[in-house]
């Protein structure tokens, strides 16, 4: 129910400068002690020259947590997750790769639809990635699923970085 309400809610955004490198590092630091992540090999490749963006750090953290939880669940709590942050055009890309089973080509567009899930019945609501898409689009960005060079899934997020400090356009 909370996820469904989150999809429809348009609560107040806390727009502020967001340092994506610090956000990714802090998100991982908060998840790492959990039992679910203990047997995960995790590495980051975070470009330092990526400019800060104007956004809601709590909503972006929610996206990262959801993507990392999805990856570790797909890996059945054992495997590799790689996160990369890089400059892309007039914005930044966050890429989350894993070496799990991946996402079939036929399911790539559907995984961002509300109530679509690749998990066993009772293991997911199908709202997590739909909420991720909504939150990324609120920031004027995009999210897509691809094949990972690690053999599993790759989720690529693009976020525009406005160097003039203006709020990004909302979808």
Image (tube, rainbow, N blue to C red):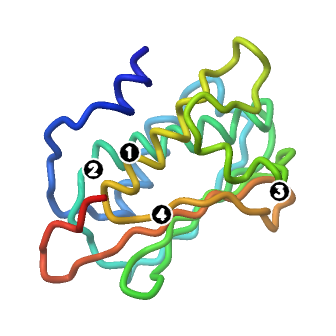
Residue that label 1 marks = 61
Q: CA distance from mark 2 to mark 3?
A: 31 Å
Residue sitting at x 84%, y 50%: 104
Q: Are marks 1 and 2 in contact (CB under 8 Å)?
A: yes
- From this view, report whether residue 125 is shown above or below residue 138: above
Task: Say which mark, if any, is on residue 116.
Answer: none
Viewer-proximal residue, 19 or 124? 124
* Residue 169: quarter of image: bottom left
The numbered disc on residue 105 is 3
Circle number at residue 57: 2
Mark 4 lies on residue: 142
Labelled pair 1, 3 in contact (Cβ < 8 Å): no
Left or right: residue 82 compared with residue 162: right
Indicate which disc, 2 or 3, sits on the residue closer to the N terminus.
Answer: 2
Local packing at callout 3 (Cα closer than 10 Å; few below 14, some 14-19, many 20+) is few
Q: Secondary structure at mark 4?
A: strand
Residue at (47, 69) in percent of width and height: 158
Q: Position of residue 86 (x, y in %)?
A: 49, 77
Mark earlier in primary sequence (1, 3): 1
Task: From the viewer's perspective, tell me whether residue 142 is left or right of residue 123.
Answer: left
Nearest to viewer (mark 2 / mark 3): 3
């Amino acid at each position: 129910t909370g996820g469904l309400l989150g999809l429809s809610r348009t609560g107040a955004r806390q727009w502020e400068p967001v340092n994506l490198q610090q956000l990714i590092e802090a998100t991982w630091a908060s998840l790492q002690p959990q039992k679910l992540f203990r047997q995960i090999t995790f590495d980051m490749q975070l470009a330092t020259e990526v400019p800060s963006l104007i956004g809601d750090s709590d909503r972006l953290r929610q996206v990262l947590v959801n993507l990392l939880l999805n990856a570790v669940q797909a890996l059945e709590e054992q495997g590799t997750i790689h996160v990369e942050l890089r400059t892309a055009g007039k914005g930044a890309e966050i890429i989350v790769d894993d070496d799990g089973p991946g996402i079939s080509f036929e399911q790539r567009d559907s995984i961002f639809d509300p109530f679509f899930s690749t998990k066993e019945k009772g293991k997911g609501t199908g709202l997590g990635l739909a909420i991720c898409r909504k939150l990324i689009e609120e920031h004027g960005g995009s999210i897509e699923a691809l094949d990972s060079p690690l053999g599993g899934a790759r989720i690529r997020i693009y976020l525009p970085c406005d160097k003039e400090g203006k709020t990004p356009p909302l979808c």
